Image (cartoon, grey):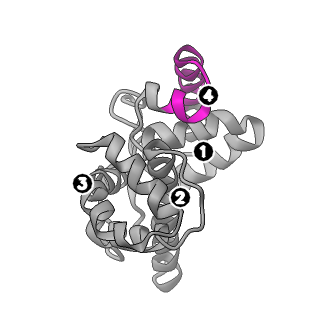
Amino acid sequence: MGEAPGQITKLLARFGKGDPAVDSELAELIYDDLRRQARRLFRSGNTPTIQPTSLVHEAFERLVKVEVDWNDRTHFFALSARLMKRLLINHVSAGRAQKRGGAAVRVTLNEQALADTSDTGLIELTDALDALATKDARKAELVELKYFGGLSLSEISAATGLSEATVGRDLRFARAWLKDRLTQHR
């Protein structure tokens, strides 16, 4: 993720302390990573209500307004993944409200995780993640970080304080649980 992770962390720290001079430099460093996150959400289809570039711009505008103590770049990208997912769900929901039976955005957890299932609508996947979160919030968070945020196991480990083995084990369980849940609700 990114060309200069140490530089991103330093800029986030300066930004968190209220230094507005870092906005453009930070945007330049993280833009490609944010676009990659947005493309993950659009991997299996598009929604007519918003395009990946617009999603990135809207997310960045909101992220720079959030008053948060940025721990590091992993924390930033984890939050940006959640925000982009929420924004996309809002756009899909608005589109459905305007047009009964509107097209749903199609996403998968990844090609390997649910290879033998068909694509699942973002809203249905979010509902399944919400159900998982009621049973095990940590596992649902790990899924978001991995599949929506694009974080590696080591980055998730650093962000959560869990060992990589625990992260891997929890993700395997969560993938199986979600696959079962999504298959049952078809």
Distance of label 4 from label 2 (alpha carbons): 29 Å
The residue under label 1 is 185
- In what quadrant of the picture does the C terminus appear? top right
Please tell me which residue is depicted at 60% across the width and 67% down the height of the picture: 67
Disc nearer the start of the sequence (4/3): 3
For disc 4, the marked residue is: 161
Q: Amino acid at mark 3?
A: Asp
Which SS class for mark 3? helix
Q: Which residues are magenta?
A: 156-179
Q: Which residue is tagged 2?
A: 123
Q: Residue at x 35, y 66 (%)?
A: 22
Tell me which label, 4 or 2, sits earlier in the chain.
2
| Picture layout, residue 137 above or below residue 53 | above
The mark closer to the camera, 4 or 2, is 4
Tell me how far mark 1 sits from mark 2, CA to CA: 13 Å
Q: Is residue 135 left or right of residue 171?
A: right
Mark 4 residue type:
Gly
Of helix, strand and loop, which one carries label 1? loop
Q: From this viewpoint, is residue 101 visible?
A: no
x and y, in percent, of residue 102 in the image? 43, 74
Would you say the residues marked 1 and 2 are in contact, meaning their CB atoms lie under 8 Å apart?
no
